[in-house]
Amino acid sequence: MTNSRLQRKQQKALPTKERTQSSIIWRKFRRHKAAMVSAAVLLILTTMVFLAPWIAPYDFDEIDLPNRQEPPSLQHPLGTDDLGRDLYTRILYGGRISITIGLFAALASTLLGTFLGALAGFYGGAIDNAIMRFTDMAISVPSLPLLIVLSSYSSAAIPIMILIIALLSWMSTARVVRGAVHSIKQQEFVNAAASIGGRNGYIILRHIIPNVMGPVIVGATLGVGGAIIIESSLSFLGLGISPPTPTWGNMLQDSQATMASKPWLTIFPGLAILITVLCINFLGEGLHDALDPTLSNRG
């Protein structure tokens, strides 16, 4: 009993510099007030959209023609669209699609970019040159026109949208990871792992990838917002998820003709995109500050 009490006292007396890395990261992230608020908003928003089948007052495709294009009211908090469908319900259901596409497209592009960047940075030489020249070529291709072309020749299903966005979004991650891996592979712990017979794949996965996760996590977070904007843009152009399945983008497309006379049909889906992407960007900024070892740990 005495020893356990002594150990607890010693743990409480540890100086700040001896705290665990996770506690330092959390303390630095917590100091970023905008990121903390954004994380809370995103948590609430994500919970609401994925609980839409249980908390939405109507079905997303429930038509009520006598009450079409009604302004916000107690019965319909955000109003109704041109078919009398409840806008609040459709924004919740649309958020499920937009956020799902954003999350999985960012995850897929991050995995692909990390894989190619790690190969280029670790092996160097001809492999590095080939991957980086391919990356430069991919960056030079105008993304939006190519997205429009690919979307017009494929079915507008969620997996197809995720694949298209991911294939055109991995390049920045590959370049960041390549530079970080190229630097880390010169460290002594990597040379030590190689000297005792560690295979290249094991060294990359066990020793190098964990040390580049900081910029990868930040890039993946910001990539979610970018993917949501891309999906919304394609849906607005009529090349994304097809109605009656709602997304924030195709809801904006449906409201084009009534922007002036029925502004709520445009304002609320637009605000959903704005708030979500803005919060994701603030969250990414907070993660960058928390994971950047060059920033001060004082606070």
Image: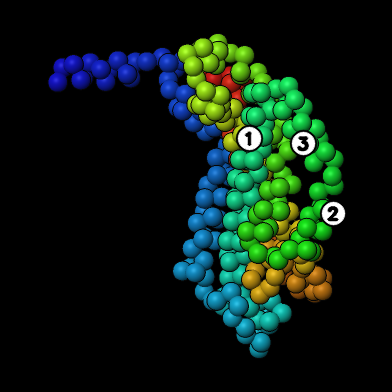
- What amino acid is labelled 1 in the image? Thr
Q: Is residue 282 above or below residue 8?
A: below
Structural crowding at the residue carrying mark 3, measured as other residues with C-alpha within 10 Å and reported as few (<14), some (14–19) or many (≥20): some
Structural crowding at the residue carrying mark 1, measured as other residues with C-alpha within 10 Å and reported as few (<14), some (14–19) or many (≥20): many
Name the residue beneath numbered marker 3.
135
- What amino acid is labelled 3 in the image? Thr
| Dot 2 or dot 1, earlier in sequence | 1
Name the residue beneath numbered marker 2.
145
Q: Tell me how far mark 2 sits from mark 1, CA to CA.
A: 25 Å
Question: Based on the displayed image, in which of its 4 quarters is residue 240 positioned?
Answer: bottom right
Name the residue beneath numbered marker 1.
114
- Location of residue 192 in the rendering, given as x and y in whole percent from the top left corner: 51, 12
Which residue occupies the extreme left position in the image? 1
Q: Are marks 3 and 2 in contact (CB under 8 Å)?
A: no
Q: Is residue 143 above or below residue 63?
A: above
| Dot 1 or dot 3, earlier in sequence | 1
| Dot 3 or dot 2, earlier in sequence | 3
Q: Which element carries disc 1, helix, strand or loop?
A: helix
Q: Is residue 201 above or below residue 273?
A: above
Name the one closer to the observer, 186 or 8: 186
- The answer to whether residue 64 is left or right of residue 299 is right
Question: Based on the displayed image, in which of its 4 quarters is residue 284 positioned?
Answer: top right
Could one spot residue 63 in this view of the protein? yes
